Image (cartoon, rainbow, N blue to C red):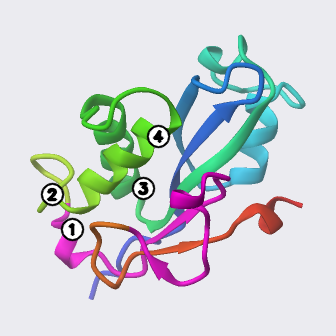
Amino acid sequence: MEEPPPKNYLVYCLVSTVAPRQTYVGVTNNFKRRLRQHNGEITGGARRTRAYRPWTPFLHVSGLTKSQALQLEWALKHRRKGGAGPEGRVRTLEFLLGTAQWTKNSTPTAELRDVHVDCAWSEEKYRATCNQPLTACDDQVFIRCFECELR
């Protein structure tokens, strides 16, 4: 019997601290290292994040296989239903989590298990409250605070 792929990937969204309307969406299996790369502390960050450093995380979706993470990243970047800026990213994520599938070939959202949405955004509407379902999602997707994990 074939073992299922590991669910150690996450999709993250960063917001610039110098230009708060600028966001960046990416995929990784080592978030601390990737954030250091984006902020120029170590080599290997994305070219697009060089201009608006430093970056701070405000949202990530964990518990995904590599394939699922790449599909969600693509959908977050290309299905801009929510508008611009951090608010738009959150609205787009809410839209995607409420759809049957993120992309034409992705895993149906009803079959996803152990997926968590972590939000560290200061606006009251999106503030992380442990184990509270994200708007428009079923009970298997939760918001958890992740700021402490970065320290």
Provide the residue span drawn in magenta. 107-134
- Give the percent coordinates (x, y) of residue 125: 51, 59
Pointers 4 and 1 in contact (CB under 8 A)?
Answer: no
Answer with left or right where residue 38 lies relative to residue 48.
Answer: right
Name the N-terminal-most of marks 2 and 4.
4
- Read off the residue under disc 3: 66
- Give the percent coordinates (x, y) of residue 41: 90, 30
Front position among marks 2 and 4: 4
Q: CA distance from mark 1 to mark 3?
A: 15 Å
Pointers 1 and 2 in contact (CB under 8 A)?
Answer: yes
- Read off the residue under disc 1: 109
Q: Is residue 1 above or below residue 67?
A: below
Q: Nearer the viewer, residue 13 or 130?
A: 130
Residue sitting at x 35%, y 51%:
93
Name the N-terminal-most of marks 4 and 3.
3
- For disc 4, the neighbor class at 10 Å (few under 14, some 14 to 19, many from 20) is some
Dot 3 falls on a residue whose secondary structure is helix
- For disc 1, the neighbor class at 10 Å (few under 14, some 14 to 19, many from 20) is some
- Give the percent coordinates (x, y) of residue 50: 72, 15
At label 3, which amino acid type do we have?
A: Lys
Q: CA distance from mark 3 to mark 2?
A: 16 Å
Dot 1 falls on a residue whose secondary structure is helix
Q: Is residue 113 above or below residue 35?
A: below
Front position among marks 4 and 1: 4
At label 4, which amino acid type do we have?
A: Glu
Q: CA distance from mark 4 to mark 1?
A: 22 Å
- Read off the residue under disc 2: 101
Dot 4 falls on a residue whose secondary structure is helix
